[in-house]
């Protein structure tokens, strides 16, 4: 197989060609600044309005509750720092989890240095939070609960509706980082009592450098980026018109095809998990077996370094990841795998394979074949594996 097999769709996705077609006119033809009054500019303004409506429809929000940002990281920063600043008179306590993306965790660490108190909820061995632990951790000075919709490494989907009910019952603002879930699983901000939601274009076959923050209309959130009056004076800076158009188009395509794609992906995902489990020994599935993103497969391989696995797979044209794109590059094991209770030596041997709706069964069969050979080869070089085999005899 000579072509690339791209199984790192949680890191980023290929831009959908139809999305690209919709974006193109806004680079060269309708390039007007949407804030200007002449008619060339009104085309850009109209396109932004359409995109905002598409995004709002995709999560059951009102058009006026969608604010475009440059991506998931900015949305997370704005939501958390914004609530911390605006609700400081009520208190300085925030609840989150140990398995959030660094866009949330590092923002919380920053706030700790500013005198805020953060509770980092534990998760169980599948990566699920405990609803009772969440409720017990609420205090009179709690101003925000920020819990991710689905985890970017192990794919576990959190009980968002239950979390929303608890937040509502205690009158606490609920933010969810839905960067991995948006466009893949149904989201309804009212049914789920979500007050703030972060999402990003490049995870759903949209462009990079664009995302949005949903802000429920009664939430007080000041501007995070100061400057001009764009985004109803809440997010300054000339709008990334082609990006916004691309995000709107990607959101619409993802939502229109969600049911059909999810069905297909779940079949492919379960097939891949089954084949890996059938063909390779001494492995552990990370994340919940069913409460997981339709496209996520994550295993730990004992006696193997995740990095060696990645390099060997790359030599066969297979793009995968060990932990998240942001943790790779560091030698520390993933904080998510440690939080689900894995010892360091096992957490080091993780592999994340994230599928797209275009992934074929033939590609998956090839990946499993390669994986089997690579794991055998790497284990044959491992003194730890040799000792383990001797001890088994
Ligand atoms: N949150 C989660 C759960 C993510 O997976 C990512 C990206 O991997 C981000 C936030 C950051 O999003 P962006 O790359 O759009 O800044």
Image: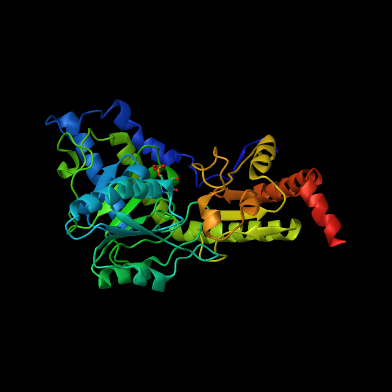
Residue 335 at x, y = what percent? 51, 51
* Residue 291 position in % (x across, y down): 51, 65
Q: Quadrant of the C terminus?
A: bottom right
> Would you place residue 166 above or below residue 81 in this image?
below
Whether residue 340 is visible: yes
Q: Quadrant of the N terminus?
A: top right
**Pick the front one: 377 or 14:** 377
Number of residue marks = 0
Image color mode:
rainbow
Report the residue at 38% width, 49% height from top. Answer: 104
Q: Residue at x 26, y 71 (%)?
A: 170
337 sits left or right of 104 in the view: right
Among the 4 quarters of the image, the one containing residue 6: top right
**x%, y% of residue 160?**
38, 65
Is residue 295 visible in the rendered structure shown here? no
Residue 172 place in picture, x, y as percent: 25, 65
């Amino acid at each position: 197989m000579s072509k690339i097999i791209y199984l790192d769709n949680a890191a980023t996705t290929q831009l959908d060609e139809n999305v690209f077609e919709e974006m193109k006119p806004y680079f060269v033809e309708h390039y007007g600044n949407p804030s200007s009054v002449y008619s060339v500019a009104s085309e850009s303004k109209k396109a932004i309005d359409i995109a905002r409506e598409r995004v709002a429809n995709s999560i059951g929000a009102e058009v006026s509750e969608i604010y475009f940002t440059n991506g998931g990281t900015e949305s997370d920063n704005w939501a958390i720092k914004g609530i911390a600043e605006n609700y400081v008179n009520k208190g300085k306590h925030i609840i989150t989890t140990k398995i959030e993306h660094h866009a949330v965790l590092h923002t919380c660490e920053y706030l700790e240095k500013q005198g805020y108190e953060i509770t980092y909820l534990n998760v169980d061995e599948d990566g699920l939070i405990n609803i009772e632990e969440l409720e017990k951790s609420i205090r009179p000075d709690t101003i925000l609960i920020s819990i991710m919709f689905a985890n970017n490494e192990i794919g576990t989907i959190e009980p968002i509706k239950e979390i929303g009910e608890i937040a509502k019952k205690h009158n606490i603002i609920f933010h969810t980082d839905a960067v991995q879930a948006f466009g893949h699983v149904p989201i309804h901000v009212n049914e789920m009592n979500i007050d703030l939601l972060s999402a990003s274009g490049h995870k759903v076959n949209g462009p990079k450098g664009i995302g949005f923050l949903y802000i429920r209309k009664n939430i007080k959130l000041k501007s995070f980026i100061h400057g001009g009056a764009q985004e109803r004076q809440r997010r300054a800076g000339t709008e990334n018109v082609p990006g916004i158009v691309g995000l709107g188009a990607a959101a619409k395509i993802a939502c229109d095809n969600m049911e059909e794609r999810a069905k297909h992906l779940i079949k492919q995902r379960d097939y891949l998990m089954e084949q890996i489990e059938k063909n390779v020994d001494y492995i552990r599935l990370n994340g919940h077996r069913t409460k997981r993103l339709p496209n996520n497969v994550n295993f730990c391989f004992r006696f193997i370094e995740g990095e060696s696995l990645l390099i060997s797979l790359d030599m066969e044209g297979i793009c995968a990841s060990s932990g998240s794109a942001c943790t790779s590059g560091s030698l520390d094991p993933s904080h998510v795998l440690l939080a689900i209770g894995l010892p360091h030596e096992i957490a080091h041997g993780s592999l994340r394979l994230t599928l797209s709706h275009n992934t074929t069964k033939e590609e998956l069969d090839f990946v499993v074949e390669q994986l089997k050979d690579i794991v055998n080869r790497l284990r044959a070089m491992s003194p730890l594996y040799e000792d383990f085999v001797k001890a088994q005899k």
